Image (cartoon, rainbow, N blue to C red):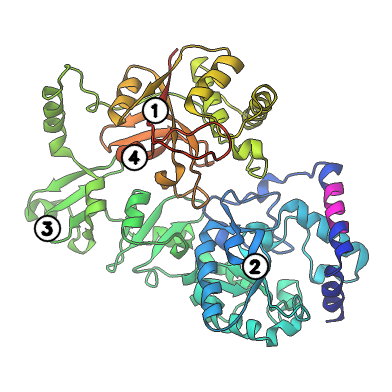
Amino acid sequence: MNIMNSIADFLKKPQTILFIIGLFFVFTIGGIVTYNSAALLREGDYIFNAVNKKHSLGQYKPDDLVELAELGAPGKHIRITAYSRLKSLMESAADDGVNLKILSAYRSYREQQSLHAYYETNYEGADRFSAEAGHSEHQLGAAIDFGSADQNTNLRQSFANTAEGLWLSDNAWRYGFVLSYPDGKEDVTGYMYEPWHFRFIGVEASDRFRTSGLSLIEYLNLAPQYFDKESLRGELIQVRGSVEVYFVTGNGYKRHIPSPEVFYSYRNEWDRIIFVDPDTSNEIPETKLIRLNADEKVFFTNEDGVKSWISSADEFNKSGYDWGSVSLVNKTEFDFYKIVEDEAAGLNQESSSSANGMNVSSESVLLEVPFAAQAPFGNWEDPRQQNGCEEASAIMAMKWVNRDTILPLDSAMNSIIEISEYEQRVYGEYRDTSAADTISRIFNDHFEYYKVRLAKNIRAKDIIRELKSGNLVVVPANGQKLKNPFFTLPGPIEHMLVIIGYDSKTGEFITNDPGTRHGKNFRYKSQVLEDALQDYPTGFHEPIENINKVMIVVER
């Protein structure tokens, strides 16, 4: 109690802030921290990752952080998965007359390293309230330290008895946030009671957690085994370390959700996914049988996005299928799968209707282009990388021109920085670069490559035609209209990406989108991408007065 009071008083002093900032720079500049690759989070698994004195995150940094300025905490960030729930929590508290403050949210490895070093140097028992770098829940981007307008209770155990603390105790779980370090559990959690520290684990999990009788660290260690297959009916599940999401039907079968569009068409939310261990998932039989609502026809689906009609009940029964395994699906999911019987007829019809004898949509094409995100190591705080989509796109294109299929992360990052600094030095600007200036400044001047041209007033069919001609296409777009689920909301208005292929079966463009580390071979529906096409002026968020749909065509 005395320790926390002393810390709270100390943190109010202006000189403390200056000292910590200075200490942060000392640690940042002073050396390189060894990175333990074994500590890497598995993709899609952060919500249930156990983080304490035994479980390390290494130097992990989330790549989908959202600033909390709208919630009264400028400069603070949280994972996008938790943002909408946090916003709802804050709004509900305000409606109830409770004025919550956000004191701390995401904290980087280096920030935690500096703070912990300071506390260890100046306070006894620092390990009871301060985590070592790599061992803090704040580094996950999923933890919040709440406070109130009364500075005397912030970061103190007396916060529990304030209106804010009582409201959180009663209601935070409804929004997916749970108390990490409860009273009387220090021997289990390793940390003293912190009634202000809440962590997001998702609405479904928080509901189960509050009745489990466990501390959070105990629950997280057991979470994959905490659900049996019967309790998962009607839920969305995902195996730890996998990217595949399934819906468990009322009859106890799991059905694969094949795309983000299908996922959202059911008004699903990512934070409602329950992570399970492989054994639990394997106990649930998978169904590939679907039926459109109000239609009696049953179809078998496969991994290639194709559905085939099972023409009779006799054929169904002879195949050994279970009628209870047939899933009713909506039109979005039904239309995702192409009907195999229609494929040949469709191709013949398209070919015969082509005015110039060249069918641009009956065949698929995919160019081999190495991928690089514009922030290869997730350092989105570097403005050269934050605004590096044009540079990253040009780098990928030039690798393709030179038939080089290898693009190491460090090489990509160094090239992005090099080009940005070249643009700043020569042209006085590197952030937003129009399509025309991307050609002249980056391709022509920097790379000294000239087999690049600008095409105006384009549509999706023009992009497909260039791809089929063996050319690579780079396009400027309104990133918000792309609705990429991996973009930090609301997404960039000025964005550039590489189109490397087209899938005629699904009607999707295949892209290397540098705006996310998940951008390799990322697919966009052709209409979505065409609608998003939009050139922008060189500068920094300059007004876009006209919608000009253009593309950069790279030949070799």
Q: Is the magenta stretch mostly helix, strand or loop?
A: helix
**Looking at this view, is 7 or 231 the one in front?**
7
Location of residue 169 (image quadrant): bottom right
Between tags 1 and 3, which lies in front? 1
- Residue 364 relative to residue 1: left or right: left
Residue marked by disc 4: 531
Q: How crowded is mark 4: few (under 14 residues within 10 Å), some or many (20 or more)?
A: some
Circle 1 — which element? strand
Residue 182: image x %, image y %? Answer: 68, 79
Residue 263 relative to residue 324: left or right: right
Q: Which residue is tagged 3?
A: 295
The answer for how far apart the CA atoms under marks 1 and 3 are is 42 Å
- The residue that disc 2 covers is 144
Q: Which of marks 2 and 3 precedes in the sequence?
A: 2
Say which amino acid is labelled 2: Ile
Q: What's the CA distance linking mark 1 and mark 4?
A: 12 Å
- Please state which of residues 111 and 311 is positioned toward the viewer in this rendering: 111
The residue pinned by badge 1 equals 550
Q: Assess disc 1: are there few (<14), some (14-19) or many (≥20) residues with their C-alpha within 10 Å of its C-alpha.
A: many
